[in-house]
Image (cartoon, rainbow, N blue to C red):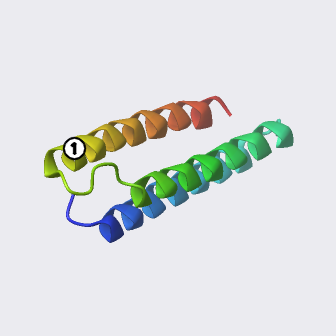
Amino acid sequence: MASKRGLKKDLNYLYSDLMLDAFASFCKKEKKDADKFSTLCNKISDNYADFIKRVNCTDGKDNKKIVKGYYKKLGESILQDVLKLSEEIEKL
């Protein structure tokens, strides 16, 4: 990770892309379920806000090893979340 700013930009790109994919998937369907779409969009925006908060609050600011481990775990959880949300978009 180069910087918090770069990570926030990447998060913004990922989650806005997920939102666009959800919207495109919703528009393509003949039987549209607005409740599912709304719930999914809320979930995407809530997860985005949660990860932005987690980027801002780093544990162990004085110890580089702890910080590196923190961001490694954060990156893994972001990847898992994006994959899970992508699967939900496909099911929409």
The x and y percentages for residue 34 are 84, 43
Closest to the observer, 83 or 25: 83
Q: Residues within 10 Å of mark 1 (few under 14, many from 20)?
A: some
Residue placed at 67% from the left, 52% from the top?
A: 23
Residue at image coords 60%, 54%: 19
Asked if one can make out residue 1 in the rendered structure from this viewpoint, the answer is yes
Residue at the (48%, 58%) spot, across then down: 52
- The amino acid beneath tag 1 is Ile
The N terminus: image quadrant: bottom left
Res 85 quadrant in image: top right
Residue carrying label 1 = 66
Residue 33 in view of the camera: no
Residue 89, compared with residue 8, is above or below; it is above
Using residue 60 as the reference point, say whether residue 29 is left or right of it: right
Q: Which element carries disc 1, helix, strand or loop? A: helix
Q: Which quadrant is home to the C terminus?
A: top right
Rendered view: 8 above or below 87: below
Q: Residue 63: x and y, percent?
A: 17, 51
Above or below — where is 58 with respect to 85? below
In the figure, is residue 58 to the left or right of 85? left
Depth check: give the residue in front, 19 or 8.
8
Q: Nearer the viewer, residue 31 or 64?
A: 64
